[in-house]
Image: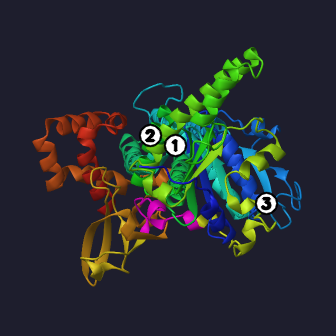
Amino acid sequence: MTMSLPGSLDSLLTSAMQGTLKFIFVGGKGGVGKTTTSSAIASLLATTCERRVLLVSTDPAHSLGDAWRTKFDNSPTTVIEKGWKMGSSSCASGSGAGYLEVMEIDPSSSMEAELAKWAEIVKTVAGAEEDPNSESKDGFASKISSFQNWLSGIPGIDEATALSAAISHIDSGKYDIIVFDTAPTGHTLKLLALPEILGEAIKKLQGWQTTAWTYWEAFKGFAASGSTEAARKRNAAREEVSDMLHKYQRDIGKVAAMLKDSVATAFVVVCIAEHLSVQETRRLLGELEKNEVASNHIVVNQLVSVGSSERSGAVLSKDEMDSLEVSREIGALDPDLMAKVIHACRLTAARGAIQNKYLNDLKTSEEAQKIATNGGIAEVPLLAEEVTGRDAIVRFGELLSTLSRKDENGKCMNADVEMKESPKTTGDKYFSEELSYIPEVGDTVTIVGLKSAAQYNGIKGRVAGSIDPDTGRAAVLLKVGETSKKLALLPKNMRLSERGTGGKNGKGSSGDDILSGENINKAKSLLDDPEIKAMIDSDPKVAAAVKDVMANPANFMKYMGDPELSGFLSKAMSKFMGA
């Protein structure tokens, strides 16, 4: 199959000029020119498309500063101002309202800030426990500390935190489009999987922390220990833990929704025509499709020839090579000089043949064939100049799109594209209610979206149990006429009406509440419940744990993370809160 003619990024720029494009991710294997390409695309958007653009690096090995020959930090710096004009021969006039600002967000610093917040919570909770200096693995502070370590180890969490911070800039109203210069392919693939991984983990953690806090309070009551001040600190820490988990869910939900918005988001893959890069590009395209992320453009850099003809670019034809050989033999030119010329030409021709093979492999591959057919593969020649600094980056950008060039009559090609005002988009557009709400015991919710049991839609109920790690559902108590019902619902079928604080009917748990006879008697009565009693009698491990906790209530914490006891704890918690 013969190669198609070179494509361009024209359709990408057209979407920007028509106001639909909001986010562009530029990714690929390390060392193929991602930073140069992302910078060039951002410059095209600011000049040719006259958009207000923010270019953000989330790559830990920042190189935007090197590309622009400027030092950047986590505050936007202007590199192309309004009205900037490079020259009369270019359509990148910057005559409109467009401008470009650049910032480098350090993912590790963003993550360190998050971990510091958890460290403070650990200190608070440790101070509220009986022995602040205790390093017991059963302590609640130890549990939170374990989560802190787990959070820092999630693949992609640092970049997701940085992305979330960047998305917030859309709310400022200063920018029409954000371009992300991402980390190498491996980081990108981890990022794509992160929303699902972290979403499920947070649901389980939320269920665990709700159960753990309530059991903590109840058994503190059994032990008749814990001051009102200690209880206040625990409750304050509980609220902070809950708020932070909701924030993670909301932020990751934004990133996930943004990545999958095929209208507002585009992913541009950058590669070079070599085996390793092409194979990695194909894998990345496959993963992007699998994760429902739109990718309609590929930039192939550093080509010694551009186009389908052997005579294109710097590569000589066979006849031209033969002519050189004849000239050398008859002494028409200096022999040494001619030898060097022939060697350079042979090297270039050989390199061009290799690149043509792999470029053809890419274009005819299952993953990229559609992109090639639609003219979405931009072929960029190997340049004699180093692409650093504003002018060089803008010139490089002109190789990516015909819209930045002039036709034979001197008319700018972008003149025929209808320019529309970019509508204001807030980060809340990328905030799914389904992803954001994590039920907590005591919350008042409205039931929505049920299909088989639609008669319950619109009815308010109270969350009576934490999320079951196995089913992802939480118990909700409601009244239908004179009848009480308990439903097991998914978070997507609940809309928060009023936030509770973990106690029955939404009442808080002050130090006095914890020690109340009502709570103590209610917790003890669970042992007489037929269903709970049956679970204890049928499982020796459950029976041993209950016996241990009854002898020493503080020991219950060491059973919180045991997956074999999660079913029993979830059932007991549901009954405790619904009693």
Q: Residue at x 18, y 35 (%)?
A: 541
Q: Residue at x 75, y 60 (%)?
A: 405
Name the disc covering residue 47, or none.
3
Q: Residue at x 71, y 74 (%)?
A: 416
Q: Position of residue 95 (x, y in %)?
A: 86, 65
Displayed quadrant of residue 104: top right
Foreground label between 2 and 3: 3
Q: CA distance from mark 1 to mark 2?
A: 50 Å
Question: Can residue 129 be seen in the rendering of this structure?
Answer: no
For this rendering, which residue is in front, 317 or 176? 317
Q: Earlier in the sequence, mark 2 or mark 3?
A: 3
Part of the protein shown in magenta = 429-444
Report the residue that reaches farthest toward the top.
336
Q: Secondary structure at mark 3?
A: helix
Q: Residue at x 65, y 25 (%)?
A: 326
Q: Position of residue 153 (x, y in %)?
A: 49, 33
In the rendered image, the vertical position of residue 463 relative to residue 519, given as above or below: below
Q: Position of residue 18 (x, y in %)?
A: 66, 72
Name the disc covering residue 188, or none.
1
Foreground label between 1 and 2: 1
Q: Earlier in the sequence, mark 3 or mark 1?
A: 3
Q: Position of residue 333 (x, y in %)?
A: 77, 22
| Colouring rule applied to residues | rainbow
Name the disc covering residue 225, or none.
2
Tag 3: amino acid = Thr
Q: CA distance from mark 3 to mark 1?
A: 28 Å
Question: Can residue 183 be seen in the rendering of this structure?
Answer: yes
Q: Earlier in the sequence, mark 1 or mark 2?
A: 1
Q: Secondary structure at mark 2?
A: loop
